[in-house]
């Protein structure tokens, strides 16, 4: 696992490739008894990754979590399961797609990847610079492929968005490097 891909908000240093698998607060699929904090919790106990801590036991973050408060992962274990949640209320009418809307959607995703906006799933800032670069390059491809078919407003807006994202990318790269250096010096 590379330093660049590590999830900054997780004590067990999982990367985005492993974050959605079963087994840990970060999603990393640890071996039986290993636990994300490495203190040997059995999976049947809940341990630091299963959220099954008894009141006062604490989790991998050392917190004193009662059931329903959420553990180190922030999950509320008394919340409705995915099968119980009614997603129909999220299926709302959306505006007509436009080139500017597509570009701003990609730009917003890039800003999440650069740690400028919090990650919607965690509420934390993450630095996924390869993903940010890919999203910025995607906007550039749209800009090039729509040459001659854009309005003046679309051209002006997309050019402005690309310039802003490039400046933000440089600043985010510097901030990531600064944070990585601070972590190594600890």
Image (cartoon, rainbow, N blue to C red):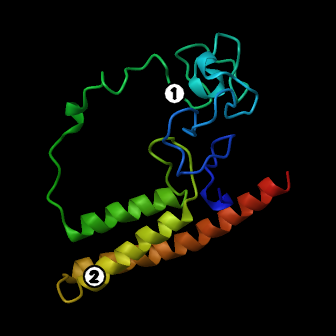
Residue 155 numbered tag? 2
- Asked if residue 153 can be seen in this view, the reply is yes
**Kind of element beneath mark 1:** loop
The nearer-to-camera label among 2 and 1 is 1
Image quarter where the N terminus lies is bottom right
Residue drawn at 64 percent across, 28 percent down? 32
Q: Residue furthest front?
A: 32
Cα–Cα span, label 2 and label 1:
43 Å
Q: Earlier in the sequence, mark 2 or mark 1?
A: 1
Q: Would residue 134 appear left or right of 12 to someone viewing this image?
A: left
Q: Position of residue 87 (x, y in %)?
A: 25, 32
Check disc 1 and report the residue beneath it. 75
**Kind of element beneath mark 2:** helix
Q: Position of residue 173 (x, y in %)?
A: 62, 68
Give the total of numbered labels.
2
Q: Is 155 placed above or below 178 here? A: below
Q: Is 64 placed above or below 12 here? A: above
Q: Position of residue 170 (x, y in %)?
A: 59, 73
Where is residue 154, by image quadrant? bottom left
Residue drawn at 73 percent across, 63 percent down? 178
């Amino acid at each position: 696992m590379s330093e660049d891909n590590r999830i900054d908000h997780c004590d067990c240093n999982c990367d985005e490739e492993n974050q959605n698998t079963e087994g840990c607060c970060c999603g990393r699929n640890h071996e039986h008894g290993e636990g994300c904090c490495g203190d040997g919790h059995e999976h049947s106990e809940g341990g630091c990754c299963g959220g099954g801590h008894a009141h006062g036991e604490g989790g991998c973050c050392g917190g004193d979590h009662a059931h329903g408060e959420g553990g180190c992962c922030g999950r509320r274990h008394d919340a409705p399961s995915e099968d119980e949640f009614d997603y129909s209320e999220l299926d709302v009418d959306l505006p007509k797609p436009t080139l500017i809307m597509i570009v701003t959607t990609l730009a917003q995703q890039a800003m999440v990847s650069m740690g400028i906006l919090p990650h919607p799933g965690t509420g934390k800032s993450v630095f996924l610079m390869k993903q940010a670069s890919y999203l910025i390059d995607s906007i550039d491809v749209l800009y090039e492929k729509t040459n001659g078919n854009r309005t003046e407003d679309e051209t002006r807006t997309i050019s402005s968005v690309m310039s802003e994202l490039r400046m933000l990318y440089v600043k985010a790269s510097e901030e990531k490097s600064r944070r990585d250096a601070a972590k190594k010096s600890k």
